[in-house]
């Protein structure tokens, strides 16, 4: 189990770990923003936006992530769009996760009593104000549980990026295996790193849940 | 009907992906065709290797279980549509099997990933392994090696019309692609190349054809296979800058079997089977057959 501390392996492992963290964090931000926007589209009174968001969710939620990575990494260069591997990975991961965020938020919106929105509208708030200041804050609190599942899955899904030119934890595992280290020791450390990340995300959401819930 | 619209959109995206995936023209060949066919090997009968636990178990089973690669055209490739395996490594495995008394129909192939080779051999899931398996001391601690049967070296695969890359020194600042985590990464980096890594060599070859990278680097045996597969489009530079000895991996304690495999390799190198196998597989890349390396018995 001491392989992490031999022949400069620790530096490699650290770099891979940080790359996983960076990729997950950037993708999470993209997923959260895009997912919220899509959820807003899906509950909006404008039919075009509703269709757009529904189609988006239908496509991205039903496509295997590896296939999305392929489409972004090998499809885009063929239409002369050349992006860096990291950007490709963020796009694939972010768009994929956004569709899940959107659906979870939408079910949260359905938990907010209709009276809340009606009261806000009768006070003269616009649709946008009603959504961002009244409905979404309450909806978000209601779905912290399923939301945490999505963001715990994100770092683990990011391992696919290792096969698409992003040097993260999966690449570390491949490199160490190739150098002939015992496979169980390699997987032990990589699994521990992912476990650490998942625990961190889980704790963050636990903290959020402990914040005083909205008084109903 | 929102469902129908969603379906239409999804299909449109899939169609786009499909057209994007059709970058290569024509259908791929596994790097072997009827021009040069490796001949069948004479199966020896009455092979008795007392003291080899692996072979005793295989005899009892009536099948020899051989581990191989399935994703290296011309070297170790499995055509899943016809369920046949082709390539230089596959031929080597068959020759050895014939000398151990097993015909082609008595071989059970198992595809084993690079990372799982030692585990599969030590755990007895396979009797021996032939698949671009480099001999090194770290691996010798867990398994033993017969051979080497081929001397490979890290080389570069470039587009046929590219004259700017003539060897590793000329890759400075060029985009070079290889597989995630492979030792090839460490060996090309000192030359100042801009290295990108993907999950498979075929991804790299695709990037080479779409001109996203300038070269693919790994063992020349693997590159020759891709050059043979995309004949006329790609070429192997032919300036190897490392040495990889390909051996046949087997159980660490089975000295008897190791000697028998070494004997089989020697016999087939001497009677010309080795060269025929090369010409029918990797030779189709345009690189002439090298001399088989000297066996290292221990």
Image (tube, coloured by chain):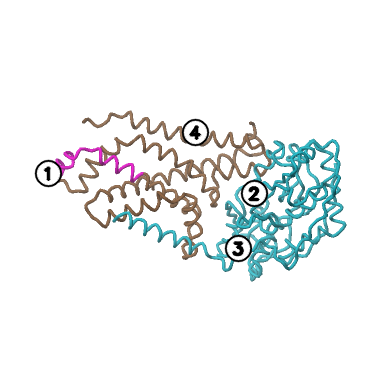
- Which x, y percent locates residue A190? 56, 37
- Which x, y percent locates residue A205? 37, 33
Chain under callout 1: A
* Depth order, front residue of B176/B92: B92
Snapshot quadrant of residue A130: top left
Q: Chain B hue?
A: cyan
Is circle 1 on the same chain as circle 2? no
B59 in magenta:
no
Label at residue B214: 3
Q: Which residue is mark 2?
A: B182
Chain under callout 3: B
SS state under label 3:
loop
Chain under callout 4: A
The answer to whether mark 3 and mark 2 are in CB contact below 8 A is: no
Q: Which residue is mark 4?
A: A196
- Which x, y percent locates residue B213? 58, 61
- Residue A132 placement, left or right of A167: left
Is circle 4 on the same chain as circle 1? yes
What distance separates the C-alpha of mark 1 from that of mark 2?
64 Å
Chain that is brown in the image: A
The answer to whether mark 4 and mark 3 are in CB contact below 8 A is: no
The answer to whether mark 4 and mark 2 are in CB contact below 8 A is: no
A106 in magenta:
yes
* Depth order, front residue of B86/A63: B86
Q: Which residue is mark 1?
A: A122
Is circle 1 on the same chain as circle 3? no
Question: First in sequence: mark 4 or mark 1?
Answer: 1
Other residues around mark 4 within 10 Å, as few (<14) / some (14–19) / many (≥20): few
Residue at 83% from the left image edge and 38% from the top image edge: B255
SS state under label 1:
helix
What distance separates the C-alpha of mark 4 from that of mark 3?
39 Å
SS state under label 4:
helix
């Amino acid at each position: 189990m001491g392989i992490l501390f031999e022949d400069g392996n620790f530096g490699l492992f650290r770099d891979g770990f940080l790359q996983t963290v960076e990729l997950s964090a950037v993708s999470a931000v993209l997923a959260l923003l895009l997912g919220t926007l899509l959820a807003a589209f899906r509950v909006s009174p404008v039919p075009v936006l509703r269709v757009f968001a529904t189609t988006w969710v239908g496509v991205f939620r039903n496509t295997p992530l590896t296939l999305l990575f392929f489409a972004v990494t090998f499809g885009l260069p063929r239409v002369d769009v050349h992006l860096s591997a990291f950007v490709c990975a963020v796009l694939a991961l972010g768009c994929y996760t956004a569709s899940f965020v959107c659906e979870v938020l939408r079910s949260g919106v359905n938990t907010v009593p209709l009276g809340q929105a009606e009261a806000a509208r009768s006070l003269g708030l616009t649709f946008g104000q009603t959504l961002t200041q009244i409905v979404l804050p309450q909806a978000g609190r209601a779905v912290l549980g399923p939301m945490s599942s999505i963001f715990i899955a994100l770092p683990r899904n990011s391992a696919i990026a290792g096969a698409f030119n992003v040097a993260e934890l999966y690449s570390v595992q491949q490199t160490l295996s190739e150098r002939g280290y015992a496979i169980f020791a390699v997987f032990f450390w990589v699994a521990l790193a992912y476990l650490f990340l998942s625990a961190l995300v889980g704790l963050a959401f636990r903290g959020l849940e402990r914040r005083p819930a909205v008084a109903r | 009907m929102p469902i129908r619209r969603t379906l239409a959109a999804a299909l449109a995206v899939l169609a786009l992906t499909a057209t994007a995936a059709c970058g290569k023209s024509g259908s791929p060949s596994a790097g072997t065709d009827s021009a040069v066919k490796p001949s069948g090997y004479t199966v020896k009968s009455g092979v008795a290797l007392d003291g080899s636990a692996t072979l005793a178990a295989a005899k009892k089973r009536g099948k020899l279980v051989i581990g191989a690669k399935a994703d290296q055209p011309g070297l170790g490739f499995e055509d899943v549509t016809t369920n046949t395996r082709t390539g230089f490594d596959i031929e080597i495995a068959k020759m050895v099997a014939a000398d151990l008394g097993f015909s082609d129909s008595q071989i059970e192939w198992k595809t084993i990933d690079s990372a799982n080779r030692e585990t599969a051999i030590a755990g007895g899931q396979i009797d021996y392994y032939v698949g671009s398996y480099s001999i090194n001391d770290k691996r010798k601690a867990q398994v033993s090696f017969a051979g080497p049967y081929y001397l490979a070296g890290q080389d570069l695969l470039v587009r046929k019309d590219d004259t700017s890359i003539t060897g590793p020194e000329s890759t400075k600042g060029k985009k070079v692609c290889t597989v995630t985590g492979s030792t090839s990464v460490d060996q090309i980096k000192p030359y100042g190349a801009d290295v990108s890594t993907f999950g498979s060599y075929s991804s790299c070859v695709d990037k080479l054809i779409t001109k996203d990278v300038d070269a693919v680097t790994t063992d020349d045996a693997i590159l020759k296979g891709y050059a043979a597969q995309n004949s006329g489009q790609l070429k192997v530079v032919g300036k190897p800058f490392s040495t990889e000895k390909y051996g046949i991996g087997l159980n660490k304690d089975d000295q008897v079997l190791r000697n028998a495999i070494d004997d089989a390799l020697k016999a087939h190198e001497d009677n010309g089977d080795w060269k025929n196998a090369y010409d029918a597989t990797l030779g189709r890349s345009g690189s002439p057959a090298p001399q088989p390396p000297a066996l290292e018995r221990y």
